[in-house]
Amino acid sequence: SLSNHMTEKLYTQVSLESSGLDSSDSNQNHGVHGVFLEQRQSNTDLEYDFYREMCPNAEMIVRATMNQIFSQHKNAPAQLLRLLFHDCFIEGCDASVLLDDSNGNANHTIEKQAIPNQTLKGFNFIDKIKEELENMCPGVVSCADILVLATRDGVLLAGGPFYPLLTGRRDNTQSFFDRAMAEIPRPDGNITETLHLFALRGFNEWETVTLLGGHNIGKIGFEFMEPGQPDPTISSDFINEMRLNCQDSNSSANDGALLPMRSRSMSESTAGMSYYQGLSSSISSGSAFDKLFADPQLMANEKTAEFVTEYALGDRNI
């Protein structure tokens, strides 16, 4: 699980701006790279149990509703984690990615329509939780806090750690289409680009490697290119492995079957050790693990490769 240092950095020191508060200035991603970035909102604007007087059962309602959702939708945690990342990476955790218009203008291009965001899922889960909260405490709990809390509870349900959260975020009324198009890390981006985008938000190389190792929950899609032939840049061994997996899931090779990620047990004492072991060993073995472009890029940089090796050998703990 995350150390106190990383938890503090992710969830308080960089727990992210929300619009509407006094503040200081401050890719398409099919795997979630981590969630928590540059802050504009000062730490004093957020606090533990922010809704204790206005809606004392708020976090309990979120947790209970997430339990219901997870019982029917096992991929909900992965969907919410990715949704939260895409929200937080642009202007902070302000729920701007949830908006259906910007500043009340339905004709304004919205963040949700940006290419990296067009495959986001989980909006319906936030709507469900919002409905439950509105029944108990109308107009009190922000959508930004709902998304953050629901994701935390989803990660816990998926076998991950519980981590305390500050609340009191404000919802943005403005959407950021252009920034979402330009600044969300791409799944086919190289390690230099990825490190640069995270560095702009206050993350060093070690923290970026750590966050990249935390994205492998849920399932991934695999499709063969039209007209039914695989991408020629993908190795034949990987294609054969995917064909077998797709057949095992009773799916045809062309229907974009969902395949379970090769994930570590999130209860391990080190965060994602098996992820780093698989990544490190697959570079030499040529297994399927190293053919998802964003992952092997960690081994293309001398410093990040060093961190991967240390995690894989158990020489570095978070």
Image: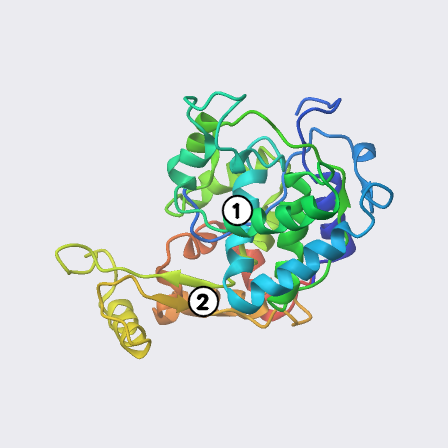
**Around disc 2, counting alpha carbons within 10 Å, would you say few (fewer than 14), some (14 to 19), or many (20 or more)?**
some
Q: Is residue 170 above or below residue 160?
A: above
* Residue 242 showing in the rendered view: yes
Q: Are marks 1 and 2 in contact (CB under 8 Å)?
A: no
| 174 on left or right of 301 | right
Label 2: which secondary element: loop
Say what secondary structure mark 1 lies in.
helix
Mark number displayed over residue 307 = none
Left or right: 121 in relation to 90: left
**Quadrant in which the N terminus is drawn:** bottom right
In three-dimensional space, the C-alpha distance between marks 1 and 2, rounded to whole angstroms, equals 18 Å
**Residue to which mark 1 is pinned:** 83
Residue 184 or residue 209, whichever sits in front: 184
Is 258 above or below relative to 203? Answer: below
Tell me the quadrant of the picture where the C terminus can be found. bottom right
Q: Which of marks 2 and 1 precedes in the sequence?
A: 1
Residue at 52%, 22% (x, y): give it: 104
Mark 1: give few (<14), some (14-19) or many (20+) Cα within 10 Å: many
Which label belongs to residue 261?
A: 2
Is residue 27 something one can see in this rendering? no
Q: Nearer the viewer, mark 1 or mark 2?
A: 1
Residue 112 image position (x, y, % from top left): 45, 36
Coordinates of residue 20 in the picture (x, y in percent): 69, 24
Q: Is residue 261 above or below residue 150?
A: below
In the image, farthest residue toward the right: 53
Q: Residue furthest bottom?
A: 248
Viewer-proximal residue, 294 or 283?
294
What residue is drawn where x is 59% and y is 39%?
88
Q: Identify which residue is drawn at 68% across, 50% down.
A: 149
Q: Position of residue 5 (x, y in %)?
A: 76, 51
Query: What amino acid is at disc 1?
Result: Leu
The amino acid type, in three-letter code, at marker 2 is Met
